[in-house]
Image: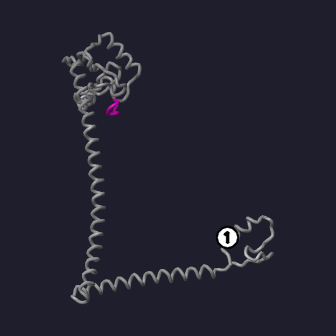
Amino acid sequence: MFHRRCLQSFEKFMKNGLLTCPICRSTNYQKKLTRVGSQAYARSCAGHIQRLWRGYAARKRFQGSLRLFYLAGGGNGSRRKRFLESRLSRAAQRFSSQCGLHSDQLDHMISSMDRTVQENQQLNALFDQMVSQRSQQTSIDTPITSHGNNSLMTSPHGWRMTEQDWTEVIESARVRGPGDCPICMLPAPHGTTIKKNVILSCSHVFHEFCILNFEKFLGNTIPTCPVCRSDYEKRQL
């Protein structure tokens, strides 16, 4: 009796087409698939598992009965002492192992928290550095403001556009044709009475209310055109 895969591998190894028994070397043997061996092995394994389980259950019951017997004051004093000492020793070992496991988990959690705090400190330092650089740039590039509805608005860098420059910008916007406000995506035709329009020095047209809210949203940051990201002056149309 052989395993089917073992016999198939043996036949492939021979490669001569002549079937010979690996044990007795008899030729021209025949094969028949049987499950007697696998069933016998399964019964043997089941019996071994049952014996192990029955032994464990019997020892467990015996240990419980013996513990109750010794706690009631029965039996020899020295044996009772050794039994209770062994039980106490096993309980102490289990407690120590659990404490060690929790200690490792606690150390890992604390180290993770330390790394997180360190990364947050680095991010805060980087943010403070960026804020200080931006404040220095803002203090250097102080904008020159002017008043009036149709007056010229100066750029954040202090340069001023002339009337000829504005004429060219307005002509460029007129050639491009009327379109929507890039912020609210609503029509922004020239001369509308619903919303006032503002043209930037880069020739992009916005609703005045939209561009003002955009500048308020940026706060102290130097505003740039929402479309082309260039510094700008603005003027009402």
- Disc 1: CA contacts within 10 A as few (<14), some (14-19) or many (>=20): few
Q: Nearer the viewer, residue 131 or 167?
A: 131
Q: For the C terminus, which image quadrant?
A: top left
Q: Residue at x 33, y 33 (%)?
A: 186
Q: Residue at x 28, y 25 (%)?
A: 223
Quadrant hosting residue 199: top left
In this view, 178 is above or below 19? above
Q: Nearer the viewer, residue 138 or 120?
A: 120
Q: Is residue 180 in sight in this rendering?
A: yes
Q: Magenta span has 116?
A: no
Q: Which residues are magenta?
A: 181-186
In this view, 218 is above or below 24? above
Q: Give the residue type that dot 1 points to.
A: Cys
Residue 210 screen position, x and y as percent: 27, 30
Residue 58 screen position, x and y as percent: 38, 85
Q: Residue furthest bottom?
A: 74
Q: For the N terminus, which image quadrant?
A: bottom right
Residue 150 screen position, x and y as percent: 23, 17
Q: Residue at x 26, y 41 (%)?
A: 120
